[in-house]
């Protein structure tokens, strides 16, 4: 098996796969050989991601659902297993971010942010985790943010959700690693398009502004490594997506020793 197809036979689910980091991760998971289930709300964005995954030689499934709709989300996971096969990797990436001072943070905004950024990760993990245990192992990758370890003005709901995701991930990692399931965290490491900005809105923006944001594909190879690794030493650790992707590209393989991978924390 070549390094470029080291995820052959794996089935990865990526939430928030229609745009941004989720799209970059999904495309690179496909390039490394995984079949990819794409979950998000916007059909045309998901179809674009699907074409990119297929162009890299892998199969993709579009599941257009709002991750806050738990029933629809779980049905998407069931469809994934029916169409692509048993899930081996879950990437909880879906997120919303609205910049508002606390006094303008309504209960509706608060609930929407926590349900999308944290609640959906819980429900997705609750579906996948027992199946990974029954099959002898797998991986769960939760995409966090600097807002998961620091506070930012205007981001009270977002910070609360990301801090929660960090706690969920680190606690589950302690339970899961001895049983063969590796749970990891990540943060972009460089500036990317804001998660709330649609691809259509992005394309209408002045080029001088959009050029300040990195192409999410430069962070995608890290998604592939975090789907591939079964090394318990990385469990519960938080990786810089850009640094880890650069390391994978330099080495040309996903088979990195844990001590080397951990230099990209």
Image (tube, rainbow, N blue to C red):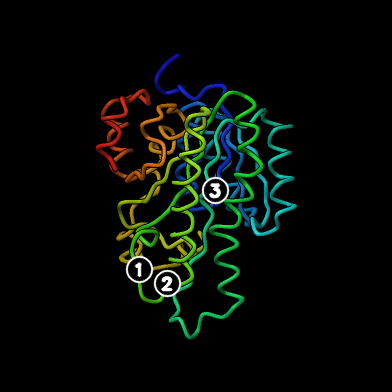
Marks 3 and 1 sit apart, C-alpha to C-alpha, by 26 Å
For mark 3, does the 10 Å Cα neighbourhood hold few (<14), some (14 to 19), or many (20 or more) residues? many
Horizontal and vertical percent for residue 219?
37, 44
The one nearer the camera, 77 or 31, is 77
Instruction: Locate residue 257 relative to residue 7 in the image: left or right.
Output: left
Circle number at residue 151: 1
Vertically, is 198 above or below 126? below
Q: Residues within 10 Å of mark 1 (few under 14, many from 20)?
A: some
Pair 3/1: label in front:
1
Q: Label for residue 17? A: 3
At x 52% / y 63%, what residue is drawn?
96
In terms of sequence position, does the residue under pointer 3 or pointer 2 come before the other?
3
> What element does badge 2 sit on?
loop
Tell me the element at label 3: loop
Q: Which one is in front in this view, the residue at disc 3 or the one at disc 2?
A: 2
User: Which secondary structure, mark 1?
Assistant: loop
Q: Position of residue 82 (x, y in %)?
A: 74, 32
Q: Mark 2 points at which residue?
A: 155
Instruction: Work out how far the residue at label 3 is from the one at label 2, CA to CA, in angstroms.
Output: 23 Å
Residue 11 lies, in percent from the top left, at 59, 30
Whether pointer 3 and pointer 1 mark residues with C-beta atoms closer than 8 Å, the reply is: no
């Amino acid at each position: 098996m070549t390094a470029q197809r080291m995820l052959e036979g794996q089935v990865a689910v990526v939430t928030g796969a229609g745009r941004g980091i989720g799209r970059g991760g999904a495309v690179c998971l496909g390039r490394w050989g995984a079949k990819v289930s794409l979950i998000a709300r916007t059909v045309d964005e998901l179809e674009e991601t699907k074409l990119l995954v297929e162009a890299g030689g892998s199969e993709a499934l579009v599941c257009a659902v709002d991750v806050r709709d738990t029933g629809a989300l779980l049905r998407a996971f069931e469809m994934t297993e029916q169409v692509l096969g048993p899930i081996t990797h879950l990437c909880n990436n879906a997120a919303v971010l609205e910049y508002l001072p606390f006094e303008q943070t309504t209960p509706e905004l608060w609930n929407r942010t926590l349900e999308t950024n944290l609640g959906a990760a819980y429900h997705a993990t609750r579906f996948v985790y027992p199946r990974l245990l029954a099959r002898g192992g797998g991986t769960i990758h939760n995409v966090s943010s600097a807002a998961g370890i620091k506070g930012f003005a205007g981001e009270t709901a977002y910070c609360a959700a990301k801090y929660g995701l960090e706690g969920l991930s680190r606690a589950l990692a302690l339970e899961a690693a001895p049983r063969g399931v590796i749970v990891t965290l990540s943060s972009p490491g460089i500036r990317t398009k804001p998660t709330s900005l649609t691809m259509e809105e992005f394309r209408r923006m002045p080029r001088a502004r959009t050029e300040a944001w990195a192409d999410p594909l430069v962070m995608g190879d890290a998604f592939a490594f975090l789907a591939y690794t079964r090394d318990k030493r990385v469990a519960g650790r938080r990786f810089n997506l850009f640094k880890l992707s650069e390391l994978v590209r330099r080495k040309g393989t996903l088979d990195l020793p844990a001590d080397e991978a951990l230099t990209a924390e």
